[in-house]
Image (cartoon, rainbow, N blue to C red):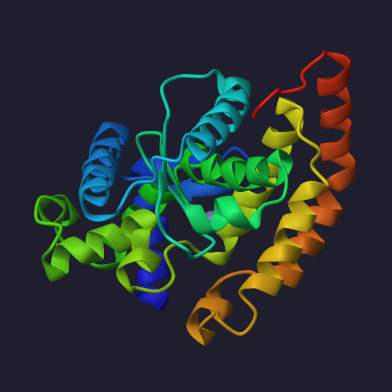
């Protein structure tokens, strides 16, 4: 374990230390273009394998909310796809790709709650969590060719690569993101939703609903590496004064997203 840490520190100091949007130092060894390419390919595979929802209300709603949020980070081209899946879940991939399950669309009871979900996923992408995961994996398992693996997503190696990108839960590998990364995505997400003009307090209601909806369903391994719902709620509550300030500024600036 110590050897691994020393290795990561050595690599980090030589080449690839970066700072995340919340000011945390990160090891990023992969070129962004390559990580984005992996994300695009994985998203393409998912779209072929998972049934896509053509419910126009769901799609308009998800796109409208995502648009309002990414405008706060300079816009750009983002793709949001609603998948037919009853589990209340969502995911993000590098290359600005977001997937939302119909189970999540059904769970939320207003646009601000969906904005909390999408803001969180955008947070994972902005903070380059996939690159960070892949870099840690490369530093620890030198020689594991993630890039080759992604070319063959059905292989064991390919599934490992998907897990590294943060798609683990989809493919039965636990721990797609770390506890630190989850908390960071929560913080970035709640700030973003507030800046876009969605009431950030709804992020807390969302996690309370998630807690009720998934009670007893989280595997133990998942819980040990992820913040519990209670921890998330507590962290969001700590962030709420700042987020409410951003929300009030957005309202004063007339940002009130009119999503269906
Ligand atoms: Zn997450």
Which image quarter is the C terminus in? top right
Residue shown at 78% from the left, 57% from the top: 205
Residue shown at 57% from the left, 70% from the top: 226
- Location of residue 149 in the rendering, given as x and y in whole percent from the top left corner: 13, 57
In the displayed orientation, state which residue is furthest to the top. Answer: 253
- Location of residue 67 in the rendering, given as x and y in whole percent from the top left corner: 55, 25
Ligand 1 quadrant in view: bottom right
Which image quarter is the N terminus in? bottom left
Which of 55 and 157 lies nearest the eye of the viewer?
55
Q: Is residue 146 left or right of residue 208?
A: left
Which of 108 and 69 lies nearest the eye of the viewer?
108
Q: Is residue 254 left or right of residue 15?
A: right
* Quarter holding residue 35: top left
- Location of residue 92 in the rendering, given as x and y in whole percent from the top left corner: 43, 46
Residue 188 visible at all: no
* Quarter holding residue 34: top left
Residue shown at 57% from the left, 42% from the top: 118
Residue 87 visible at all: yes
Residue shown at 76% from the left, 34% from the top: 198
Count the marks.
0
- Location of residue 161 in the rendering, given as x and y in whole percent from the top left corner: 24, 59
Examine the rendered structure and indicate whether residue 139 appears above or below residue 18. Answer: below
Which of 13 and 139 lies nearest the eye of the viewer?
139
Which of 137 and 252 lies nearest the eye of the viewer?
252
Q: Is residue 53 left or right of residue 34?
A: right
């Amino acid at each position: 374990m110590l050897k691994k840490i020393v290795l990561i520190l050595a690599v980090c100091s030589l080449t690839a230390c970066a700072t995340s949007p919340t000011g945390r130092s990160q090891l990023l060894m992969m070129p962004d273009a390559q990580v984005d390419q992996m994300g695009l390919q994985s998203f393409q595979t998912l779209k072929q394998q998972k049934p896509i929802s053509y419910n126009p209300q769901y799609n308009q709603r998800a796109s409208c909310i995502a648009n309002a949020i990414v405008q706060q980070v300079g816009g750009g081209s983002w793709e949001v796809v609603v998948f037919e899946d009853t589990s209340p879940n969502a995911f993000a991939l590098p290359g600005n790709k977001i997937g939302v399950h119909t189970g999540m669309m059904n769970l939320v009871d207003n646009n601000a709650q969906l904005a909390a979900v999408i803001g969180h996923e955008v947070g994972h992408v902005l903070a380059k969590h996939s690159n960070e995961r892949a870099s840690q994996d490369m530093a620890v398992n030198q020689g594991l060719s993630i890039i080759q693996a992604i070319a063959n997503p059905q292989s064991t190696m390919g599934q490992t690569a998907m897990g590294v990108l943060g798609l683990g839960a989809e493919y039965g590998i636990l721990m797609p993101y770390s506890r630190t990364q989850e908390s960071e995505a929560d913080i970035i997400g709640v700030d973003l939703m507030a800046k876009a003009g969605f009431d950030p307090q709804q992020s807390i209601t969302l996690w309370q609903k998630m807690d009720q909806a998934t009670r007893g369903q989280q595997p133990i391994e998942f819980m040990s590496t992820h913040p519990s719902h209670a921890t998330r709620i507590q962290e969001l509550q700590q962030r709420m004064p700042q987020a409410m300030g951003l929300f009030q500024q957005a309202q004063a600036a007339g940002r009130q997203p009119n999503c269906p």
